Amino acid sequence: MSQPTVASKVERLRAEFDNSFAVPARTLDSEVVELLAIGAGGRAYALRLSQASGVHPDRRIVPLPTSVRGLLGLAGFAGVVVPVYDLAALLGHPLPERPRWLVMAAGTPPLALAFHELDHHVRVRAADVVDSAAGPEGQRGCLHGMVRLPDGNRPIIDVPATRMLVHQLAGHQSEGAAT
């Protein structure tokens, strides 16, 4: 049997992601948590699906001349220009290769986070998620909790905390606290 093509994997992941929004919220409330298992900077992480509004592969990013750590540039989404930050760089372990995936962070202002690998979408029992209190400021403050998955434990990236870090790096602490 032949290996699935990248296009078929992308299509399968997109369908799983889209279908996850069709599930009634009442069946997912406190007993199930939906996550995206991702890779950034050569490490395994998870993102809460409720903190994302879309996932996009191979989006064109226009680079900007900047000294802001992790800022890759700007990308267009449905006519809106959105800043794109390298998630690995924000977490303190950049890779020389350009990330191929973008996740749109839920909330405002618009923000996209770039990462290297999209491993899978998963629903886990809430008991498999170990929440932790907010960590120290900076990159480690972006990690809130851990999830037990069959392929190993993964730290959970808290998208709102990551948004706050982006605002701090860009020099907008007051805006970051308000969003």
Image (cartoon, rainbow, N blue to C red):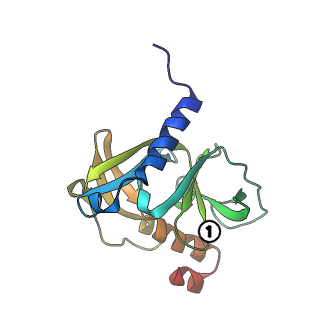
> Residue at (50%, 20%) from the top-left corner?
3
**Is residue 109 shown left or right of residue 155?**
right
Percent across and percent down for residue 32 are 27, 56
Label 1 Cα crowd, 10 Å radius (few <14 / some 14-19 / many 20+)? some
Q: Position of residue 79 (x, y in %)?
A: 74, 62
Q: Residue at x 58, y 76 (%)?
A: 168
Residue sitting at x 71%, y 64%: 80
Q: Secondary structure at mark 1?
A: loop
Outermost residue to the bottom: 174
Q: Nearer the viewer, residue 52 or 116?
A: 52
* Residue 67 location, quadrant: bottom right
Is residue 71 among what the camera can see? yes
Residue 94 location (% of width, % of height) = 57, 51
Q: Position of residue 42 (x, y in %)?
A: 49, 43
- Determine whether, in the image, residue 67 is placed left or right of residue 143: right
**Observer-nearest residue: 120 or 145?**
120
Q: Which residue is mark 1?
A: 110
Furthest toward the top, the residue is 1
* Residue at the image position 56 percent from the left and 25 percent from the top: 5
Going by the numbered disc 1, the residue's amino acid type is Pro
Q: Quadrant of residue 83?
A: bottom right
Q: Measured along the vertical axis of the image, is residue 105 above or below residue 61? A: below
Q: Is residue 165 above or below residue 9?
A: below
